[in-house]
């Protein structure tokens, strides 16, 4: 699908419905169960408590339908002695992929992090998500060869 112009803006609570639609598809992409009300509560709390920054992408031909989003979490790095952003989630509608939306969302994420004096933008993606890995590497993201990531489930 050709999308002439793409605009990116930060989401507010007024955008919660369009964000939920995308987030449900994001959960499906990663083969996770989706509970609309849990998603709503999660996203509303992140935005309301300023615990995350959410950027939405729109095509200028339809400013009502969000075509993609990125969810950024602020944090800190002790070793870098500075603020970082974790690009935790990036999703683009399937029909709108390969139109430059993911690139615009990454560009906007980098700009937001720079304006906030962050020292780094971190991300992780599924080992099977080769397309995303190619894009991130194109942007200069480096695969961590020094540290291994671990996760401990509390559920």
Image (cartoon, rainbow, N blue to C red):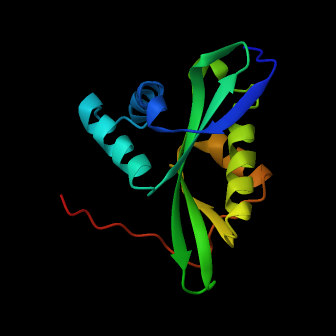
Residue 100 horizontal/vertical position (percent): 76, 31
Residue shown at the point (32%, 44%) measured from the top left: 42
Residue in the image at 49% along x and 73% along y: 148
Give left or right: position of 101 versus 23: right
User: Is the residue 66 above or below the residue 124 in the image?
Assistant: above
Residue 28 relative to residue 69: left or right: left
In this view of the protein, which residue sits in the foreground, 61 or 24?
61
Screen quadrant of the C terminus: bottom left
Can I make out residue 35 in this image?
no
Residue 42 vs residue 21: left or right? Answer: left
- Please tell me which residue is depicted at 72% across the width and 12% down the height of the picture: 61
Q: Where is residue 28 in the image (x, y as percent from the top left)?
A: 39, 30
Q: Nearer the viewer, residue 74 or 13?
A: 13
Res 26 seen here? yes
Left or right for 151, reference 148: left
Q: Which residue is at 39% across, 29% downward?
A: 24
Question: Hey, which quadrant is residue 97 in on the image?
Answer: top right
Residue 76 image point, x, y percent: 53, 75
What is the quadrant of residue 67 in the picture? top right
Quadrant of the image occupied by residue 86: bottom right
Residue at the extreme left: 155
Residue in front for this viewpoint, 95 or 8: 8
Q: In this view, does 4 lie above or below 153?
A: above
């Amino acid at each position: 699908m050709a999308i002439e112009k793409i605009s990116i803006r930060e989401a507010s609570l007024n955008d919660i419905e369009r964000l939920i639609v995308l987030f449900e598809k994001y959960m499906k992409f990663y083969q996770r169960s989706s509970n609309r009300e849990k998603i709503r509560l999660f996203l509303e709390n992140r935005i309301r408590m300023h615990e995350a920054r959410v950027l939405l992408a729109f095509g200028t031909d339809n400013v009502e339908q969000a075509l993609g989003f990125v969810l950024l979490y602020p944090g800190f790095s002790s070793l870098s002695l500075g603020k970082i952003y974790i690009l935790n989630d990036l999703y683009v509608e399937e029909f709108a992929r390969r139109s430059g939306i993911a690139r615009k969302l990454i560009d906007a994420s980098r700009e937001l992090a720079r304006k906030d004096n962050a020292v780094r933008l971190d991300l992780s993606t599924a080992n099977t998500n080769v397309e995303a890995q190619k894009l991130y590497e194109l942007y200069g993201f480096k695969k961590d060869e020094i540290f291994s990531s671990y996760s401990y489930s509390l559920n």
